Image: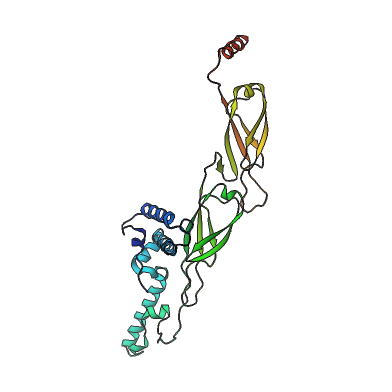
């Protein structure tokens, strides 16, 4: 099997730390993502290599195995056992138990080469797991929708449930690396990176928003129409509403993950706005009101 230099693919040195690896991966993943390079086979191949490299180097234990075994890092334990078995058989052969030619190279035995050993069996290995990052917006994950991903030159149609969290990881079974010698395929792990360009702040299933309230409505009360995440609602403002007052709109928050038609709440905080650029008449009336309060 040809050796793949994952350090070279990410453009980092072998002394790079975890932060360096993460930074390099994100930069390259954005550059070569299939969504930004449609019908570009070179970019697709590069994107695959970047994900493979990150899968290995971003995990300390995997990285340690890779440094010793190269691209066969996932089978490090099997290699060690095979070598120990080979050494044992070699020792037995030197005492006359077996002929030296009975033992094939253990790498050929592991990966399906000409097996001339006593059993002639090929060991099956599970394929490598892949990791990918999918960048979405808060609007994207407000509703359940389908999306096509390109992984290892294959298009995968997945359903993204409403309410997924930033940083959440889901597993797509069997869409990782191909198994060896008929072994099962690995899995694909997708981590969601969710940006929020809205005025709403999200905390799990609840949303929070600040709303400006003019001084006169705050004092006298009235009605105010505001935007929720997907619609508009009319609020009744109580007289003498104070700055910083919070109200809860039940069921107007974010969808609950994999719980159909269930939503969190929306919390609205009023910020009373003091009028500026008062006219002479307005100032006169404000002074009159001030004198009434004495």
For the C terminus, the image quarter is top right
Farthest residue toward the front?
A: 39
Q: In the image, what residue occupies the spot 38% across and 62% down? A: 63
278 or 138, which is in the foreground?
278
In the image: residue 105, left or right of residue 214 = left
In the image: residue 105, left or right of residue 261 = left
Q: Where is residue 171 in the image (x, y as percent from the top left)?
A: 54, 61
The answer to which image quadrant residue 86 occupies is bottom left
Observer able to see residue 189: yes
For the N terminus, the image quarter is bottom left
Q: In the image, what residue occupies the spot 43% across and 80% down? A: 112
Observer able to see residue 160: no
Q: Which colour scheme is used?
A: rainbow
Q: In the image, what residue occupies the spot 37% across and 66% down? A: 66
Q: Where is residue 80 in the image (x, y as percent from the top left)?
A: 38, 73
The answer to which image quadrant residue 156 occupies is bottom right
21 or 281, which is in the foreground?
281
Q: In the image, what residue occupies the spot 39% across and 60% down? A: 57
The answer to which image quadrant residue 15 occupies is bottom left
Count the labels in the image: 0
Q: Position of residue 102 (x, y in %)?
A: 37, 88
Asked if residue 134 is positioned above or below residue 77 in the image, the reply reads above
In the image: residue 14, left or right of residue 29 = left
């Amino acid at each position: 099997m040809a050796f793949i230099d994952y350090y070279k693919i990410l453009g980092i040195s072998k002394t790079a730390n975890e932060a360096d690896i993460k930074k390099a991966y994100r930069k390259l993943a954005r550059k070569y993502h299939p969504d930004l390079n449609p019908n570009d086979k070179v970019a697709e191949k590069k994107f695959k290599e970047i994900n493979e490299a990150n899968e290995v180097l971003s995990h300390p234990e995997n990285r340690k195995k890779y440094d010793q075994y190269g691209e066969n890092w996932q089978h490090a334990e099997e290699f060690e056992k095979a070598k120990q078995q080979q050494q044992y058989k070699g020792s037995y052969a030197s005492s006359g138990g077996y002929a030296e030619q009975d033992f094939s190279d253990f790498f050929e035995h592991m990966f399906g080469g000409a097996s001339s050993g006593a059993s002639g069996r090929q060991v099956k290995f599970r394929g490598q797991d892949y990791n990918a990052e999918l960048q979405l917006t808060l609007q994207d994950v407000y509703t359940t929708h389908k999306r096509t991903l390109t992984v290892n030159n294959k298009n995968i149609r997945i359903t993204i449930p409403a309410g997924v969290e930033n940083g959440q990881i889901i597993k797509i079974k069997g869409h990782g690396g191909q198994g060896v010698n008929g072994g099962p395929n690995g899995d694909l792990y997708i981590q969601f990176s969710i940006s929020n360009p809205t005025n709403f702040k999200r905390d799990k299933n609840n949303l929070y928003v600040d709303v400006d309230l003019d001084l006169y409505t705050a004092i006298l009360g009235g009605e105010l129409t505001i935007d929720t995440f997907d619609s508009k609602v009319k609020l009744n403002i109580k007289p003498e509403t104070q700055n910083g007052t919070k109200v809860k709109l039940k069921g107007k928050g974010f969808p609950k993950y994999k719980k159909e038609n269930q939503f969190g709440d929306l919390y609205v905080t009023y910020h009373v706005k003091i009028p500026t650029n008062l006219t002479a008449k307005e100032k006169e009336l404000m002074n009159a009101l001030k004198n009434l309060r004495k």
